[in-house]
Image (spheres, rainbow, N blue to C red):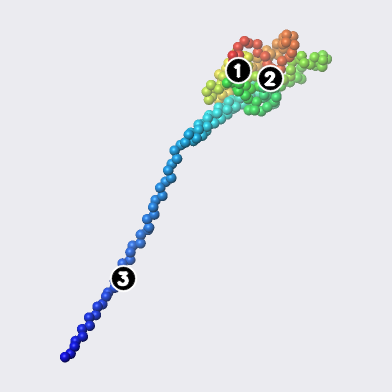
Amino acid sequence: MKREVIVTMVVHTFQKPKDRAKTARHQPLESPAPSRSNSRFDALCQSYSTSFQDVAAYLENSATFAEKLFQGLERYLECPHRHIHCCDSQGRERGLREALHLEQGFWHMHLELHLDQSLATSPRTKRDFQVYYPPQSLMMPILFKPISPSQFVVQMKGARERFIINGSQDHDFDTFYEMMFHHIQSHFQRMLDHISQRSEAPNWIVIEEPFSMLE
């Protein structure tokens, strides 16, 4: 009896796995840092910045006006260069911006006019009574105050007249300069009265009027 040997062959077919699609790994989004709410310190810093800008604009505007007034007076009088300069309240020569100072809400500027003495005679008595002779330099105190970014009220200290001057209009200054010219002339015309009544020859212009801007 023959034996039949049945061999069963099992063939395994190995399939190559499909390539997996490569996908980028998901990166978690960074959440934005929480915004810091304005602190009270931040509010104070902002207030300081605003205040600083306001004051800086006010000071620069005032100084620019003073420079225009100074330069315009020099041109109006047609005086030689350096015959007008600025002084502080003690009469010491200073730069214009350094000499300006605030007092009771008004800017004060002191202009010194240096006059030509060549026309004056020199009597023999001058060496003995020099203190009584009219001074060669005359101090002119001026007050001004901004009333708008472009307009200023201006006055010589002690004078009744007030002038509203537009700083951007050069011709606006002329009426004020004319007033100054007449007050300076009057000051020297009354010099003998000053000396005889007050025993001195003042080098600060004296305006004999009852009204003052500061009153």
Secondary structure at numbered mark 2: strand
Q: What residue type is labelled 3?
A: Lys
- Between the C-alphas of marks 3 and 2, the distance is 109 Å
User: Where does label 1 land, which residue?
Assistant: 155
* Mark carried by residue 16: 3
Q: Look at the picture and state if 106 lies above or below 53.
A: above
Tell me the kind of residue under disc 2. Met
**Going 50% across and 35% down the picture, which residue do you hit?**
41
Q: How many marks?
A: 3
Residue 75 or residue 46, whichever sits in front: 46
In primary-sequence order, the first of circles 1 and 3 is: 3
Residue denoted by label 2 = 139
Sequence-wise first label, 1 or 2: 2
Can you give x and y, in whole percent of width and height, for residue 93 in the image?
A: 69, 25
Q: Quadrant of residue 113?
A: top right
Q: Helix, strand, or loop for circle 1?
A: strand
Where residue 51 appears, as percent x and y from the top left, is: 52, 30
- Residue at position x 73%, y 10% from top? 198
Q: Which residue sits furthest left?
A: 1
